[in-house]
Image (tube, helix red, strand yellow):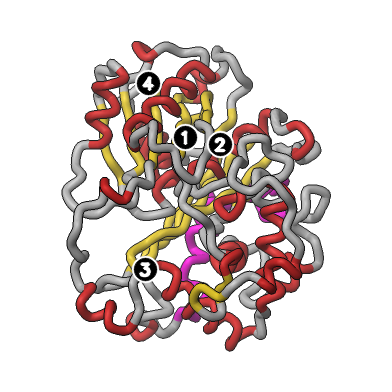
Amino acid sequence: MSLKDRCAIVGASMTKLARKNPNMSTVGFALEASRMAILDAGLSKDDIDGLLFVAPSQQGERHGFSGRVADLLGISSNFNATVDCGGATPIACVQIAAMAVNAGMCKNIVVCYGWQNNPMDVPPGLPPGFEFTLPYGEIGATPFLANITRRHMHDFGTTSKQLGSVAVLCRKHACLNPNAQQYGKPMTLEEHQNSRMVAEPLRLFDCCDWTDSGGAVVVTSAERARDLRHPPVYISGWGQAHGAPLLRPWRNPAIPDWETWSRAGDAAFNMAGLTRKDVDVCQFYDAYTIVFLVQMEAGGFCKPGESGPYVEAGNCELDGELPSNTAGGLLSEGHTMGMGHIVESVRQLRGECGVRQVKDAGVAFMTGFGGVVNEYPPTFSFSTMILRR
C-alpha cells in the first residue's frame, strides 16, 4: 500500500537563529520550536501523542532527548524516539512520523530539533577510531569533504568558482529572509575566492557555520489535516540510501561511485508518481558547497559533473529553472541539520515567503545528508522527501 499523500505537515516553525545564544539550551530550543509548531497547526499540546527528536551532534552519553522534550512539553505520548543519521535525520524523522501515523500509533506527531553550540556541553574524549585518523588531520567533516571536492574536481573538472556560485546563491536568498541573522549582506564571487582556505580546496565560504537554533513540524493524517488552520502540505514521497561508496567501491563495483545515492531520489519520485520536471522548488542539503552539488546530482536534477555549470548559469535563482535553497540554506540561513529546509518548503507551498516566494510553488523536493566520516567504518546517510500543496 502506497503512503503517498496519506499524511501531511500541518505546523512548522523555526526559532530565532544566532551564532551564539547562551541563554537557551539544546532542549530549550526544541521546546520553543515545538510549542510554536503546535500553535501554528492550530492544535494544543493535548492533541500531540508522539514526538521525534533530531539527535544533536554531541559526543558522549546523551540519551533520552525525546523523552525529556515530551515530558517538559507536558505531552503524554504513545511513540517517542531520538533519531540519528546526521544531516539526513530531519527528513528521516518526518518519514518515520508519517509511518507511525499511518500505522495508527499516533494522531499528531511533533518532529523537533534543537542545538546549542556550547563547547562545555561536549564531554572530553575521542570517538572510536579517532586514533587512526587524527594523526593525518582527518578530524571531522571539513577535511573529508575537501577530499570529496578534490575527487569531484578530478573526475568532472568542477572549479572553485562553481563552488562559489553555490555560496553566492545561498547568501543572496538569505538576504531576503529576515530570520537569517548570521549574514546580513550579499556576497560576491570575488569575496568567496578571496576567503581563506580551511581545508584545500574548500574555502571559508564553502563551509557553513554552527548555529544555535530550533525547528519543528507537526505531522498528522491527510484526513485530519483538512480541518486544521492551514491548507495541508502533503507528504507525497520519500527515500533513503546509506553507505560510503566513494570509500569502499569494491563492495558493489557494478554501481558507479557517484550514482549510489541516486536510489533515494528515485524512490521519492516513484512513490509520489512525479518527475523532476514537476518540481517547483528544491532545498538541497548544503553544509558545504560541494554537498549541494552532489545532492543535486544524486537527486537526479543533473548528471554527475553537470551541477557546477548548472548553478553557475543561474538556474537555481528564485526566477530560474530550479529555484533552490530559497531561505539561504545551511550556508547562509543557518545550520539546522536540515530542519530549516523542511520548514522553508512548507512555507513556500503555503505561499508565505514574501519577496523570496517562488511563483505558483506546488511541489517541493528536499534532501538530507549526514554521516560519520572520520571514524571507522565511515558511513553516509542520504534522505529525500517530496511535499506538495
For residue 137, above or below residue 92: below
Distance Cα–Cα, label 4 vs label 3? 39 Å
Q: Amino acid at mark 2?
A: Val
Q: Secondary structure at mark 3?
A: loop
The residue at 33%/65% (across/down) is 372
Distance Cα–Cα, label 3 vs label 2? 27 Å
Left or right: 21, with 171 as reference point: left
Residue 274 located within the stretch drawn in magenta: yes
Q: Nearer the viewer, mark 4 or mark 1?
A: 1
For residue 98, above or below residue 383: above
Q: Nearer the viewer, mark 2 or mark 4?
A: 2
Residue 248's spot in the image, x, y percent? 35, 81
The residue at 51%/13% (across/down) is 42
Please tell me how crowded label 3 is: few (under 14), some (14-19), or many (20+) other residues with Cα within 10 Å: some
Asked if residue 50 shows in the view, the reply is yes
Is 302 in front, or is 138?
Answer: 138
Tags 1 and 2 touching, CB below 8 Å: yes
Q: Nearer the viewer, mark 1 or mark 2?
A: 1
Q: Nearer the viewer, mark 1 or mark 3?
A: 3
Q: Which comes before the other along the chain, label 3 or label 2?
A: 3
Mark linked to residue 230: none
Q: Which comes before the other along the chain, label 4 or label 1?
A: 4
**Which residue in the structure is indicated by mark 2?**
343
**Which residue in the structure is indicated by mark 3?**
140
Image: magenta residue range: 255-282
Distance Cα–Cα, label 2 vs label 4? 20 Å
Distance Cα–Cα, label 1 vs label 2? 8 Å
Q: Amino acid at mark 1?
A: Gly
Residue 196's spot in the image, x, y percent? 59, 73
Is 121 in front, or is 128?
Answer: 121
Residue 163's spot in the image, x, y percent? 65, 70
Q: Nearer the viewer, mark 4 or mark 3?
A: 3
